[in-house]
Image (cartoon, rainbow, N blue to C red):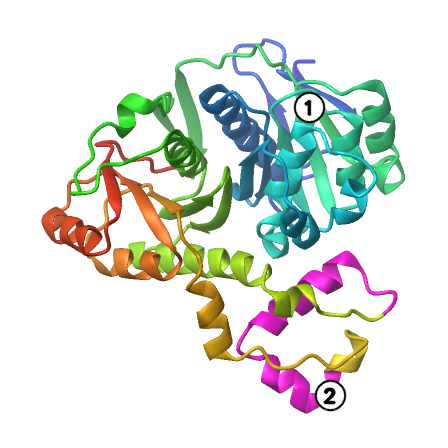
Amino acid sequence: MRELQLKYGCNPNQKPSRIYMNDGGELPIEVLSGRPGYINLLDAFNAWQLVRELDTATGLPAAASFKHVSPAGAAVGLPLDETLAKIYWVDDVIREKDLSPLACAYARARGADRMSSFGDLIALSRICDADTARLIKREVSDGVIAPGYEPEALEILKAKKKGSYNVIQMDGGYKPAPLEHKEVYGVTFEQGRQELPINEELLSDIVTENKTLSKENIRDLKIALITLKYTQSNSVCYVKDGQAIGIGAGQQSRVHCTRLAGQKADNWMLRQSPRVLGLQFAEGISRAERDNAIDVYIGDEYMDVLEEGAWQKIFKVKPEVFTREEKRAWLDQMDGVTLGSDAFFPFGDNIERAKKSGVRYIAQPGGSVRDQAVIETCDKYGMVMVFTGIRLFHH
């Protein structure tokens, strides 16, 4: 297939719309089901690059959840404990059988920030198996891209959305040209592709007093930087135990990236608290409604919901207020978190905010005139910080 006609461009009024190869060659994808749109395919190609690189860097199957050309979540296929299975809404499946590593990667990528993942485009680094397809079937999603599909998995996915779900097969051996082009306002931009490998060598310049990094720490630093490589800049990514737990994308201020990603990481941690795990939901509400209810419950506006009496529509039993003091006490248990930044930290305020979300390991390019002040802030908390020397802007 040399070109693919799309429903429309970024918006319904932007027609005609298509993708094609400038060299007249074959497209590297095959649409097995559905009719993907312009944004679907932007997400698909960016997400595919991310998971392929995660798999190469870690040796583990990888998954990503993409929305509007930035990842909502990214993870590798490590097993899920009981608590994570519950907050990702896959505990009912795990009670019956162990999930495949790829399904675990998908559950993690989808589950870390379920609010942002609603209606996502999913990428899988390996052939989609039936376990993964069954999890995808339960979620609100626009499509999936993978290098292949097991027959049972393809049957499950083709039935989603009454046959209109976008199932895309990627040519795993495809290698794009070294130069890439983009047209803006009738002007063509050209640049070399971002082919920088994220490896141990990139993580060798440890600038803090604490220089101890385990192999798990190095894995998580790689995950943070690879995720940032495909996130709209400015961007910051928090990672814990093989998965992104908070991504701040497209902010003009570095500290706002750190705050946004940190709040998402905090929400991930708060969802694991006994107070949230004990919530009793009303019968018949959807998975998305449960996600929204939890987001409101752990937010500061929950007192307003109680006062308005709206809780009866959501919960069987009126939950007690989760006070700021209780939330802070729970968050203070958070530790061992990794943070990556796509450009240097200009001030130590980023480190101070990261500390509140349990960050101990940091990778950033360095190069600020205030590098020493940032290093001293890290040393104050016994953190490990690596200077990569490489910026990872993505637009």
Indicate the secondary structure of the residue bearing disc 2. loop
Tell which of 260 and 351 is nearer to you: 351
Magenta residues span: 283-310
Q: Is residue 272 left or right of residue 58?
A: right
In this rendering, is residue 170 above or below 245? above
Q: Earlier in the sequence, mark 2 or mark 1?
A: 1
Task: Write down the residue under mark 2.
Answer: 309
Asked whether residue 15 appears in the rendered view, the answer is no
Left or right of residue 370, residue 26 in this image: right
Instruction: Kindly indicate the quadrant of the structure image that contains residue 229.
Output: top left
Magenta segment main secondary structure: helix
Label 1 Cα crowd, 10 Å radius (few <14 / some 14-19 / many 20+): some
Which numbered disc, 2 or 1, marks the residue closer to the eye?
2
The structure residue drawn at horizontal position 65% and vertical position 14%, both measured from the top left corner, is: 2
Q: Position of residue 14 (x, y in %)?
A: 62, 43
Q: Which quadrant would residue 35 be assigned to in this image?
A: top right
Nearer to us in this view, 85 or 205 = 85
At a point 70% along the width and 13% down the height, the residue shown is 1
Q: Position of residue 329 (x, y in %)?
A: 45, 70
Magenta-span inclusion, residue 183: no
Considering only vertical position in the picture, is 358 above or below 22? below
Identify residue for label 1: 4
Q: Is residue 299 magenta?
A: yes
Q: Secondary structure at mark 1?
A: strand
* Three-letter code for the amino acid on which mark 2 is drawn: Gly
Please tell me which residue lies in front, 210 or 39: 210
